[in-house]
Image (cartoon, rainbow, N blue to C red):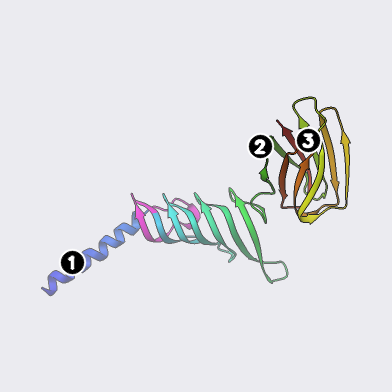
Amino acid sequence: MKYVAAILLLFFITSISVAQQTCEVKLAEIKGNYTGDCENGKASGKGKSVGTDEYEGDFKDGYPEGKGMYIWKDGHYFIGSFKKGKKEGKGDMYYEGANGDDSVITGYWKKDKYVGHYENKYEVVASTTHIGKVNFSLLNEKGDDILITVHQLRDIAINISSITILAGQYNNKTSQQLSNSSITNITDVVFPFRAIFYLNNGESVDLLFNEKGDYDVYIDVQ
């Protein structure tokens, strides 16, 4: 009986070893020793893989995907979200600064690149029925002005009649009226900046600018 039990134990250990060896990790930098969940011969679920670098967290189809912690060989590390082996979404990057102190970068990543403290630099929070397309352009990341063009598809004079500030502030506002559009320039803006822009036809749009910059905004009114 002891001999049979020993054989079964050896078979169980061997089965685990074979499963780990055939559980593929597709990211070259962390290939080496993998322990964790497998599906169809690939790392999927919770796991840890150690190669030149190290990763522990969620896997899918052999890649880090979901929440996890990635440690580079030089010691700096990232805790956050991954998609197909790349940083994607919110996370924190920890590293040693030039002065030897620990530093951290918090924010959002897209396709492995840091995009800023916020996921979106700007967005339309809300708008009324006849506000059409709202297009944003970031002209200069170091600026602090917002230029807003409001365009009416018909030949009706339309403009921004008032502004309600919900976050941040600005120093000055100038406006220019054209036949079927208006141009409003808001200067010396303190970001993050959020405001409701009321138009003289009763429509309104709530805009949020998360990060500093010179912005060009084009609003179509239907």
35 is within the stretch colored magenta: yes
Q: Residue at x 76, y 44 (%)?
A: 197
Highlighted magenta segment, given as a residue range: 24-43
**Residue 32: image location, x then y, percent:** 43, 59
- Label 1 – label 3 distance at C-alpha: 77 Å
Which residue was labeled with disc 3? 150
User: Which quadrant, please, contains the C terminus?
Assistant: top right
Q: Residue furthest left?
A: 1
- Label 2 – label 3 distance at C-alpha: 15 Å
Q: Is residue 36 visible?
A: yes
Viewer-nearest of labels 2 and 3? 2
Compared to residue 136, the image places residue 168 above or below, namely below
Viewer-nearest of labels 1 and 2? 2
Viewer-nearest of labels 1 and 3? 3
- Tell me the crowding category of disc 2: few under 14, some 14 to 19, or many 20 or more residues within 10 angstroms, Cα based: few
The amino acid marked with disc number 1 is Leu
**Residue 180: image location, x then y, percent:** 81, 28
**Residue 143: image location, x then y, percent:** 82, 49
Which residue was labeled with disc 1? 8
